[in-house]
Amino acid sequence: MTDFGQELDQLLYAEISERRDSVKGANRVDILSLLMSATDAEGNSMTDKELRDELMTLLLAGYETTATAMAWGLYWIHYKPEVREKLLQELDTLGENPDPISIYKLPYLTAVCNETLRIYPVALATFVRKVEEPVDLLGYHIEPHSSIWGCIYLLHHREDLYPDSKQFKPERFLERQFSPYEFMPFGGGVRRCVGYALAQFEMKLVLATVVSRYQLALADNKPEKPQRRGVTLAPARGVQMKMEGRRKSR
Ligand code: HEM
């Protein structure tokens, strides 16, 4: 295990043991406390190792992915002034302190988030599928024990579906609807990402709030390249931005 992995384990195990000892923990409703109070059909609760695994999944599958998606969103919105302008026009129609559901439903904001997740899908590929019985798939015969991954990146750059696929164009999501076989930033089928609804909600609310309240700018105009970071596709230079002040809605 890497130093980082060990450090993360130490922090997680310390948190678990502290929570087990704490009397105050009894009435807490945070996710760790809920996991600790959960029991299976036989009344067994989770071991420290199982709790550590659940926390690790949430941290890596839940936070790292969504944070990366939002970093890409901020990058595209500020890299393309016309996108920011159009988005602000839409956000300003909601007035001061809009409710979260109205933000969630905004068509252009949805298109910007979808295009962000299309062009550099945070998860390059789906998780692995193990083949259990012989199957023919698109002209390929696949034997049991084979492993198959769906490559989300390649699907999202098919020119027949997404002309000029390397260009950031939110309008493509307003002009037509893509099926779950054509657009799948969260994978697909029964093992599709369990956090997909939360992730989209979070991404829209955070981007809408930041963009409508603050005047931000990219630190420079150099294009941000995608770089593999573990299983995610992240901005190589980390999207450095400057804060230029607060923004007043028009
Ligand atoms: C923009 C953010 C996110 C992206 C792009 C993303 C993407 C994905 C993808 C591609 C998969 C594999 C699906 C497949 O193999 O078909 C996956 C699985 C998973 N994701 Fe996410 N995810 C995101 C956010 C989240 C959040 C917020 C959570 C939890 C709160 C989460 C939890 C999981 C879990 C537990 C799995 C495994 C599901 C299973 O195997 O049944 N993800 N995600």
Image (spheres, rainbow, N blue to C red):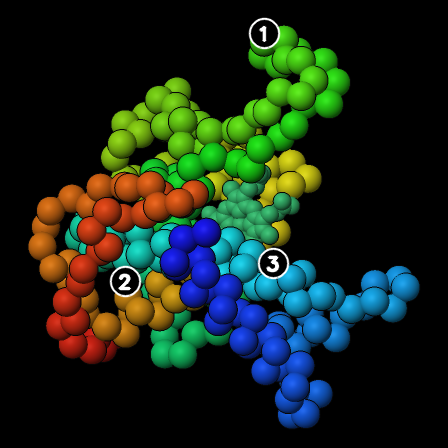
Q: Residue furthest right?
A: 42
Q: Secondary structure at mark 2?
A: helix
Q: Dot 3 surroundings within 10 Å: few (below 14), some, or many (20 or more)?
A: some
Residue receiving disc 3: 53
Q: Nearer the viewer, mark 1 or mark 2?
A: 1
Q: Amino acid at mark 1?
A: Gly
**Disc 1 from disc 2: Cα separation:** 47 Å
In the rendered image, residue 47, in percent from the top left (x then y), is placed at 71, 66
The answer as to whether callout 3 falls within 8 Å of ligand 1 is: no
The answer to which of 240 and 75 lies nearer the viewer is 240
The answer to which of 15 and 216 lies nearer the viewer is 15
Residue receiving disc 2: 88
- Do tag 2 and tag 3 residues touch (Cβ < 8 Å)? no
Q: Secondary structure at mark 1?
A: loop
Examine the image and state in which quarter residue 106 appears: bottom left
Q: Amino acid at mark 2?
A: Leu
**Disc 2 from disc 3: Cα separation:** 41 Å
Left or right: 71, with 10 as reference point: left
Residue 148 is at least partly visible in this image: yes
Q: Residue furthest bottom?
A: 24
Left or right: 228, with 23 as reference point: left
- Residue under the image location 67 percent in, 81 percent down: 20
Answer above or below: position of 58 versus 16: above
Answer above or below: position of 238 versus 156: below
Return the disc, 2 or 3, that comes first in the chain's sequence: 3
